[in-house]
Image (cartoon, rainbow, N blue to C red):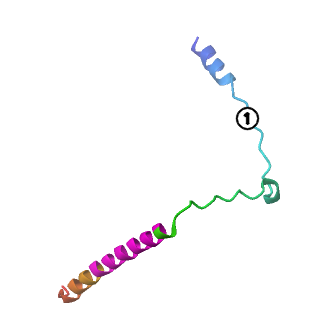
């Protein structure tokens, strides 16, 4: 009985999909460009200022770490 169950299970195989040939670039075409979101120049300027401020703060922290490492005696 177990042989017949095993044979039944092994007998069915799902059909294999046919392999597709690779598309050529001229067949697929160019993707449509995504429009830039409408951002006011004031918002853009404010965002850039915030980014610069954060980078300055990071630079100051790195300088203090650098000074601490320079004063530390090598082991």
Rendering coords of residue 45 (x, y %)? 46, 72
Image quadrant of residue 36?
bottom right
The answer to whether 34 appears left or right of 40 in the picture is right
Nearest the viewer among 16 and 34 is 34
Rendering coords of residue 17 (x, y %)? 74, 37
Q: Residue at x 71, y 56 (%)?
A: 32
Nearest the viewer among 69 and 34 is 34
Above or below, 71 relative to 12: below
Rendering coords of residue 70 (x, y %)? 23, 88
Q: Residue at x 46, y 67 (%)?
A: 43
Nearest the viewer among 10 and 23 is 23
Q: Tell me which secondary structure the magenta stretch mostly adopts.
A: helix
**Residue occupying the far top of the picture:** 1
Q: Would you call the spot at circle 1 few (<14 residues within 10 Å), some (14-19), or many (20 or more)?
A: few
Image quadrant of residue 56?
bottom left
Answer whether residue 59 is magenta in the image.
yes
- Where does the N terminus fall, quadrant-wise? top right
Above or below, 47 relative to 14: below
- Where does the C terminus fall, quadrant-wise? bottom left
Considering the numbered disc 1 on the image, is that residue within a helix, a strand or a loop?
A: loop
Q: Which residues are magenta?
A: 43-61
Above or below, 28 relative to 70: above
The answer to whether 60 appears left or right of 20 in the picture is left
Rendering coords of residue 30 (x, y %)? 75, 59
The answer to whether 66 appears left or right of 73 in the picture is right
Report the residue marked by disc 1: 16
């Amino acid at each position: 009985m177990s042989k017949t169950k095993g044979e039944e299970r092994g007998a069915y195989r799902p059909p294999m999909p046919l392999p597709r040939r690779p598309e050529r670039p001229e067949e697929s075409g160019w993707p449509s460009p995504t429009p830039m979101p409408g951002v006011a120049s004031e918002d853009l300027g404010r965002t850039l200022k915030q980014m610069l401020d954060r980078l300055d703060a990071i630079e100051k922290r790195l300088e203090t770490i650098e000074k601490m490492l320079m004063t530390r005696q090598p082991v």
